[in-house]
Image (spheres, rainbow, N blue to C red):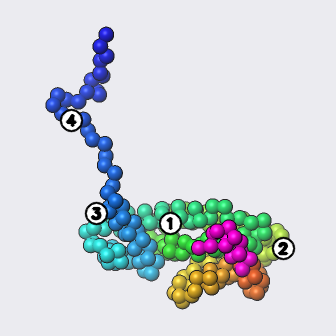
Amino acid sequence: MPTLTPPSSRAPHGARAPRAPRAPRKDALENRAAILDAAAAVFRRDPEAAIDAVAAEAGLSRRAVYGHFSSRDDLLAELLERGGRRISAALTGVRHDDPRIHLALIGGALYGQVAEVKVLASSLLHSPLEQLAGGALQPVRRSVREAVVRGAAAGDFRDDLDPEALARLVEDAAIAVLDEAVRSELAHDEARRLVMSVGLSVAGLAWREAVDVADTAIALMSTAGGAA
């Protein structure tokens, strides 16, 4: 007995079956990635920058940028989502039984994603997408808070502040130092050590101890192949 094809699956007589969507061309994907990289650099320097500045940074026309993103907010939204993914990936497995080293390792991970962190932090203040930016930074805040709570309980960190408040101060300090490290064009190792040690100092360590802990964390990162 012949098999009947359901009417809904038949193509009209003489018509071609619909083609599967084409995968984006390689050059289109490269242009999109270049636009996102350019936007990260531009918005880190100037959170209010226009699309024209992004196009110039990417070496593309304004029209080419709008061919990938329908608006500035559309571009920024994807940039924030990308930043959140990269930061979450960088923090995967970042933990240590010693809360001081744990906090230093967070600083090292953030330094490795400095452009993404700065765009997210700036967007909290300068963008209608601040909720998206705040959500993307949640992995950082959870990890910092855990380290702060454990460090205060162990007597390593100051316990005269609410852990939430102290975690916010550590986060704000780390972001401010990230910006200064980039602006001052410090050498890679020096800048990373500074980001780590300042966060530890805010948490309650004396600066010499903070530098020693940062150096210990850097050695661990190098041993694990995680030096960035």
Residue where numbered disc 4 is placed: 16
For marks 3 and 4, give the one nearer the viewer.
4
Pointers 1 and 3 in contact (C-beta within 8 Å): no
For marks 4 and 2, give the one nearer the viewer.
4
Q: Is residue 225 magenta?
A: yes
> Callout 3, which amino acid?
Gly
Q: Is residue 147 magenta?
A: no
Disc 3 versus disc 4: distance between alpha carbons?
29 Å
> Callout 4, which amino acid?
Arg
Local packing at callout 2 (Cα closer than 10 Å; few below 14, some 14-19, many 20+) is: few
Classified by dominant secondary structure, the portion drawn in magenta counts as: helix
Whether residue 139 can be seen here: yes
Disc 4 versus disc 2: distance between alpha carbons?
73 Å
Between discs 4 and 1, the one toward the N terminus: 4
Left or right, residue 154 beside residue 63: right
Disc 1 versus disc 2: distance between alpha carbons?
34 Å
Compared with residue 123, is residue 209 higher up or lower down, i.e. above or below? below
Disc 4 versus disc 1: distance between alpha carbons?
42 Å
Residue where numbered disc 3 is placed: 67
For the N terminus, the quadrant is top left
Stretch in magenta: 215-228
Mark 3 falls on what kind of element? Answer: helix
Local packing at callout 3 (Cα closer than 10 Å; few below 14, some 14-19, many 20+) is: few
Disc 2 versus disc 3: distance between alpha carbons?
55 Å
Between discs 1 and 2, the one toward the N terminus: 1
Disc 1 versus disc 3: distance between alpha carbons?
22 Å
Residue where numbered disc 1 is placed: 83
Between discs 2 and 3, the one toward the N terminus: 3
Q: In the image, what residue occupies the spot 41% across and 77% down? A: 42
Residue where numbered disc 2 is placed: 155
